[in-house]
Image (cartoon, coloured by chain):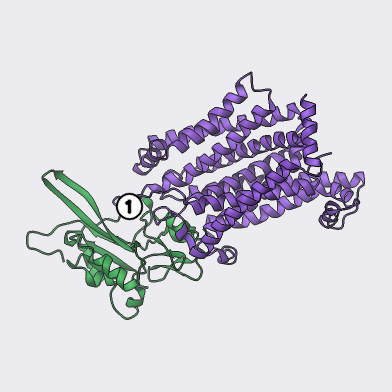
Amino acid sequence: MSIQINQMKKNMFQSGKKPLLTLWYVFLIAVLALGAVAVGLRFSQGLATTHLTSAMPWGAWVAFYIYFVGMSAGAFLLSSLIHVFDMEHLEEVGRDATLVAIICMILALCFILLDLGHMERFWHSLWYWNFTSILSWEVRFYGLYILLLLAELYFALRHDLVLASRGEGLKATLAGILKLGSNDTSAEGQERDKRMLKILGSIGIPIAIFGVHGGTGVLFAVVKAQAYWNSALFPVVFVISALVSGTALLTALYVIRSRISGKEIDISLVKSLAGWMVLFLLIDVGLQFFEILIGAYGLEEQELATLAAIFASDFSWSYWGVQMGIGVLVPLILYFNPGTRRSPTAMMLAGIAVVIGILGVRFNIVVPALTVPVLKGLPSGYYYPTWVEWASSGGIIGLGLLLYTLAIRYLPIDVE
Amino acid sequence: MSKRYGFVMLVYRCIDCKACQVACWAENEVPLGKTRNWITRDGYRGTFPHLSVDYLPGNCMHCDNAPCVSVCPTGASSKREDGIVAVNYKKCIGCKYCMVACPYDARYFHPEKEVADKCTMCKHRLAEGKEPACVTTCVGGARVFGDLNDPHSRVSKLLRKHRHKVLLPEQGTKPSIYYIMERPQEGGNLE
């Protein structure tokens, strides 16, 4: 029966009509169109289209930015672990992980670009280098990291690109350009690619951990004025939650794509990915508990006020509901309940729940800390995003989904 | 020795009239709803109805260890020789990192210039030999301005003579605004 359904689904995608795919594109175009209107308004009217204020200078866009930097770093670390430590049973998602890492990083940069008052001056942060600014270091790490990711994707795909370029049609033409003049299909060539992937992965792991995502955590942690951020554990939690969201996204993507393409699901692969995800999630929750505990014992007014804003304010549903409920409780129940733990669908849902939960984590990092004024007597901040902030964010995520859909269609991402 | 401009606030003289804010808005064409200076209430003492409170006028503290300067990715925020923390509007990319990092919330986002903006110590007035607008307008003379490196300046003399404090010393920012909390004898003066 399930084989029949899979066959039907396969037909839907590969026959001339492809209704599901058409529907997906219509959905993406709608999201992108709405996003384009919002971005247009943001361009013409500036940051007045947001609810950002002097007390609340960072909001949804910055939360999405660290969310996608984390997702990228998490996906990349997984792919590097696969290449560097020869985790062959996970190799099937290796290319997907690299692709996801690139797309997430592009989205992250789109988000932070929108947040700049002067978008056209983004290059100032490269040209005028303030040595003591973590942000200026981060911009450099992001650039280096994207180059590294592109190189890694190239060496992962090179062999299949050369093969694909020998066919006909759009896919072959594209492969012909992207193979960058290589025509080598020998076994030695493939060995060389593997070596390159190992080298790039080994360089990439410290860059991703300390430079890209740990560094993004440091960007927040060095701000002494925000007591809640100002802890040495903060960047560590950043990296762990990146691993959580990266593995969660790849688990969900693997199951969704296998379902759609009708490919047989490798249950041991799903279980292995979900296992990593849950392990990282448990470490993440434990470290966050320490962070909150130590902060609370410090009895610093700022810190206590921020914790109160997280746990008991008008917006604490995003902590209890999204971060802890959807992001921790749901996946743990799905993973440890004997009735669901062997079901790929349940693991997919667990992955999606974690991906949503980590978004709550990122919002709860950025927003509550800023609502508390440091100097007594100054106004406190109050923030929720405007429709322009939501719609533009949706549009950027839609762009990522479109890029991903096109990439898996026209590039040899799937291991044959 | 180079100059190091700063403020000394004679807190007992502040009556919370906010003339300093109005003068600053007018002098510097501060956008509606934003402000470069403020007055906060501090240290409620006693029980109702026998209460007293201090009013603390404030603005950018022009810190010697300015967090806004160290986090700025482009160097648009800088600490000048004369002690002023200045923003280069042409360099600023509007990332708002400085606004997040400032413990005094001294900065705002300029809605038309799309950059971070704040107190400049009225450096255009200093260039003409005048004092900042908030100082010349202060009704009670609570705001005193001058060169902290000049031992003969009024600010230096006041700081030598009276106990003073800075705001949020635990932040380690070394602000250039000092608060004298002492009160003179009835009818007296604190010079």
Q: Residue at x 50, y 62 (%)?
A: A117
Residue A304 as seen in the image, left or right of residue B146 = right
Above-or-below relation of A65 to A359: below
Badge count: 1
* Picture quadrant of residue A137: bottom right
Residue A282 as seen in the image, left or right of residue B37 = right
Above-or-below relation of A54 to A250: below
Q: Position of residue B45 (x, y in %)?
A: 17, 46
Residue A247 as seen in the image, left or right of residue A313 = right
Of the chain colours in the picture, the one used for chain A is: purple
Q: Residue at x 67, y 46 (%)?
A: A101
* Picture quadrant of residue B150: bottom left
Q: Position of residue A143 (x, y in %)?
A: 65, 56
Of the chain colours in the picture, the one used for chain B is: green
One can see residue B33 in this view? yes
Quarter of the image where the N terminus of chain B is located = bottom left
Give the farthest residue toward the left.
B186
- The residue carrying mark 1 is A379
Q: Position of residue B168 (x, y in %)?
A: 33, 52
Q: Amino acid at mark 1?
A: Pro
Quarter of the image where the C terminus of chain B is located = bottom left
Helix, strand or loop at label 1? It is: loop
Q: Which of A349 and A75 lies nearest the eye of the viewer?
A: A349
Q: Residue at x 83, y 47 (%)?
A: A193
Q: Which of A155 and B33 lies nearest the eye of the viewer?
A: B33
One can see residue A105 in this view? no
